[in-house]
Structure formats: structure tokens, C-alpha cells
Amino acid sequence: MDFLDLAKERYSVRKFSTKSIEKEKLDLVLKAGQFAPTACNFQPQRILVINSETALSKLEECTPYRFGAPAALLVCYDKTVCRHRKFDDKASGDIDASIVTTHMMMEAADIGLGTTWVMKFDPEKIAKTYNLPDNIIPVALLVIGYPADDAVPNKLHQQRLTIENTVFYNDFLDYSL
């Protein structure tokens, strides 16, 4: 599929089938995350695959937004590995993890899986629940699986601002548009 068509058609799935994800498909999604660009190619991403019944039931203690997905990818970064910007010490980890998550989300859509990027979770609780070491920082939770037959996009999915409202040219922003 053409990338722009894929980007336009992909939506946050809020109702999943009970069908398990084949290992080959999960591996492709994880490979897309591996190929994602990161600052200086330091690759600080650390991804916890949550797909056992025990681990999934613990996930429901951390977020109400599992949507019945048969798996989830907890995308984190290792704060001892990520790049730091010299002039303000901004760490790249959250940005790198977000790029990785986006790559995996789009690969999943391309191979027929659905995802929802869940931000509503308590990072401290999820770190404690899954026994993450202190240097591993949770950023995103990508619930993943096959969309249910009756899954539909949110009613606002197709509504987009015009390019003129979101893109500006030259040396300054003109908010008078």
C-alpha cells in the first residue's frame, strides 16, 4: 500500500478480535521498531512484549485501555543510553521511543493488525508492575492485535485541518491566518 494511503486509513482500534498474533507478524512489527531512526543511532529503545494471560491481566491494573487486545508492546528507553543535547541536556529517549512506536504502529497496519497508542498509564505503576529497572523509562503502550469485525474508527478520524492551518513557511510564523 502507498504510505500516504496507509497513514490515512490507519486508525486507533478500540475493539480487538480474540485471535492471537502470529509470531512472524509480531516479529515484523518489532523489526520495524529496530529499523526506526534514533538520535545518533544510539538505539535506547527497550520494548517489553506483553502477551501472556498473566502479564495482560496485570496490564489491566495499569490502564483501562487494553480494548481486549491479545498483546501490548510497552515501549521504553534506557536513560543511560540515549543521546543528550549539549546546550540544554535534553535527552532523546522519549522522542526515540515515540519514533520506534510510530514505525511499529505503521508496520502493524500494513500487515493487517490494529493498534492503539495508549498514553494513559501511570509510568511508576507500570514500571513496578513489570519490575523494570530504574534506568528503563516507559513512554508508550501500543496495544496490538487483529481488529474485531465490528471495529470502526473514531467519528473524528477523518477530520483534518488544512495544510495551510498547520504548515508555515519562511522565518516566522504568521498566526493571523
Image: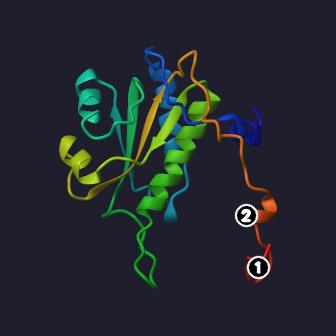
* 137 vs 69, nearest the viewer: 69
- Callout 2 crowding tier (Cα within 10 Å): few <14, some 14–19, many ≥20: few
Q: What residue sits right under mark 1 in the picture?
A: 174
Q: In this view, does 85 lie above or below 144?
A: below
Describe the element under mark 2 as helix, strand or loop. Answer: helix
Tell whether 131 sits left or right of 177: left
* 77 vs 16, nearest the viewer: 16
Residue found 45% across the figure and 53% down from its top: 97
**Which label is found at residue 37?**
none
Is residue 30 shown to the viewer in this render? yes
Residue found 43% across the figure and 15% down from its top: 18
Q: Position of residue 177 (x, y in %)?
A: 80, 72
Query: Where on the picture, by quarter, is residue 59?
Result: top left
Tell whether 87 sits left or right of 5: left
Looking at marks 1 and 2 on the same chain, the residue that comes earlier in the sequence is marked by 2
Q: Is residue 136 above or below residue 155?
A: below
Colouring scheme, one of rainbow, by chain, secondary structure, one colour: rainbow
Q: What residue sits right under mark 2 in the picture?
A: 166
Q: Where is residue 161 in the image (x, y as percent from the top left)?
A: 74, 55
* 98 vs 69, nearest the viewer: 69
Is residue 35 shown to the viewer in this render? no
